Image: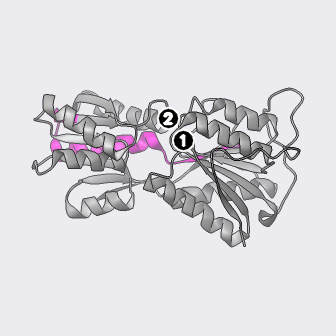
Amino acid sequence: MKKMFLLAAGLLVLSGCGAATLDNGGSSETQSEEKAASELTVGVSISTLNNPFFVSMQEGINQLAEENDTDVRFVDAQDDTAKQSNDIDDLIQQGVDVLLINPVDSAAIVPAVEAANNANIPVIAIDRSSDGGTLLTTVASNNEEGGKMAAEFILEQLGENAKVVELEGVPGASATRERGKGFDDYAKDKLDVVEKQSANFNRAEGLTVMENILQANNDIQGVFAQNDEMALGAAEAIGNREGVVIVGFDGTEDGLKAIEEGRMTATIAQKPEEMGRLALQAAFDHFQGKTVAEQIDSPLELVKK
């Protein structure tokens, strides 16, 4: 049976079991001996398990790991870049065979990726990429296309020059940049984006930020939130105002329920469980000597009532 450990931030570093370090201090390509899935120890760093999306991602990894008797060790960064770096250092010192990393911040994660490169440990990024270091692959939805899908839907619902608010995710996260770019590029000259503010992919912040925006813009017609958590917060702030189109991103259970109940209009649904499975399968393929694509796309779908 697979062993799963949720490691605390203060986990003691195990001495004498780190992977070998490359002489050149960096790596352009990781070389790994072939291993069966049941022989692997996989380290997984998730940005936060306080978000249902990433809990589903963890479940997808767990399911495939259990099917293959793979040892998986999870760490929860709790949306803290320093904690994530320390957690990954711990996993490297334990000598894991491969790292699956869902970065809190795509720039801040670079030193941790480079540390894994130096230890000759393959790194797979999930949902968000890394701005540097060498990755075996990135498993993610096409976030830019998803942002465009949201803008297209809002335009279809409200028409040109509709007044729209955009709630942005964690500054520096690749998903924030890409979803924003897809939305903004399509919305330019078509929608009137009156306000863009970060709510850090967080429901409570989505509520607060939306309340503040409404004080200055009480005639908004639409909201694009870069994840469902922020969309749910915005929906709470908007309350019973009629005709406001609210579009989220992720397709979480809470988001889909809100669409059924009429509190949200639509979401760009990802498949986080499938994303987790794809990432772990990429690790299995690598250690079986198979070629792994630099980018593995996870599917997207517009979901409305």
Q: Are marks 1 and 2 in contact (CB under 8 Å)?
A: yes
The image shows residue 295 at horizontal and vertical percentages of 61, 44
The image shows residue 58 at horizontal and vertical percentages of 56, 58
- Identify the residue at image location x=68%, y=56%: 73
Quarter holding residue 86:
top right
Residue at disc 1, secondary structure: loop
Crowd tier of the residue under label 1, counting other residues whose Cα lies within 10 Å: few below 14, some 14–19, many 20 or above: many
Q: In whole angstroms, how far apart are the C-alphas of marks 1 and 2?
A: 7 Å
Sequence order check, earlier mark of 1 and 2: 1
Q: Which mark is residue 169?
A: none
Give the residue at mark 2. Answer: 173
Left or right, 115 with respect to 278, comes to: right
Up/down of 95 relative to 198, above or below: below
Q: Nearer the viewer, residue 229 or 9?
A: 9
Q: Is residue 112 magenta?
A: no
Quarter holding residue 74:
bottom right
Give the residue at mark 1. Answer: 128
User: What span is colored magenta in the figure?
Assistant: 136-164
Quadrant assignment for the N terminus: bottom right
Left or right, 49 with respect to 190, comes to: right
Residue at disc 2, secondary structure: loop
Crowd tier of the residue under label 2, counting other residues whose Cα lies within 10 Å: few below 14, some 14–19, many 20 or above: many
Q: Nearer the viewer, residue 148 or 18?
A: 18
Quadrant assignment for the C terminus: bottom left
